Image (cartoon, rainbow, N blue to C red):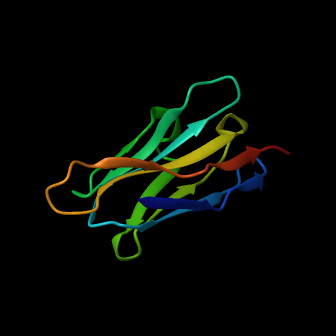
């Protein structure tokens, strides 16, 4: 089992910044992908950013140029730096990690509990 713990959410004014952290622990042999999702009130959960073991990153069009995803592999931790935040960014942000516990296994997905980000004056 893998446990995913998020931190860094909170209330920020428009134009401000927040840095989210997501730490994975437990039975981990290798992590393949690390992702941030968000779900705003009345909307479906959407992929915000992803980073893969190859180093490739991907972002939703709505956050390109404002958000940056990064990974500290030694700590099994992924970060999401959010700059120039807008009220539309208000949502619960979730961390997702796919990993294997032993060599040769098929990767499984693990989710964090979610952290609230509110952008308001």
Q: Position of residue 107 (x, y in %)?
A: 27, 49
Which quadrant does the N terminus fall into? bottom left
Residue at 81% from the left image edge and 43% from the top image edge: 120
Q: Nearer the viewer, residue 65 or 46?
A: 46
Residue at 57% from the left image edge and 39% from the top image edge: 38
Q: Position of residue 39 (x, y in %)?
A: 61, 34
Q: Quadrant of residue 71?
A: bottom left
Q: Nearer the viewer, residue 48 or 68?
A: 48
Asked if residue 53 lies left or right of residue 68, the reply is: left
* Residue 20 seen in this snapshot: no
Quick check: 3 above or below 50? below
The outermost residue toward the top is: 42
Residue at 85% from the left image edge and 45% from the top image edge: 121
Q: Position of residue 48 (x, y in %)?
A: 48, 41
Asked if residue 57 lies left or right of residue 93, the reply is: left
Q: Nearer the viewer, residue 33 or 117?
A: 33
Asked if residue 83 lies left or right of residue 57, the reply is: right
The outermost residue toward the front is: 1
Q: Position of residue 67 (x, y in %)?
A: 51, 50
Asked if residue 60 lies left or right of residue 94, the reply is: left
* Residue 119 seen in this snapshot: yes
Q: Quadrant of residue 45?
A: top right
Quick check: 55 above or below 40? below
């Amino acid at each position: 089992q893998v446990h995913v713990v998020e931190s860094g959410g909170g209330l920020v004014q428009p134009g401000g910044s927040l840095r989210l952290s997501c730490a994975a622990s437990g039975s981990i042999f290798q992590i393949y992908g690390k992702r941030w999702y968000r779900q705003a009130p009345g909307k479906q959960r959407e992929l915000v950013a992803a980073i893969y073991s190859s180093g490739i990153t991907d972002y939703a069009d709505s956050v390109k140029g404002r958000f940056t995803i990064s990974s500290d592999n030694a700590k099994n931790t992924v970060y999401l730096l959010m700059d120039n935040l807008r009220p539309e960014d208000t949502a619960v942000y979730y961390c997702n990690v796919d990993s294997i516990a032993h060599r040769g296994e098929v990767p499984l997905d693990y989710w964090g509990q979610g952290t609230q980000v509110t952008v308001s004056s």
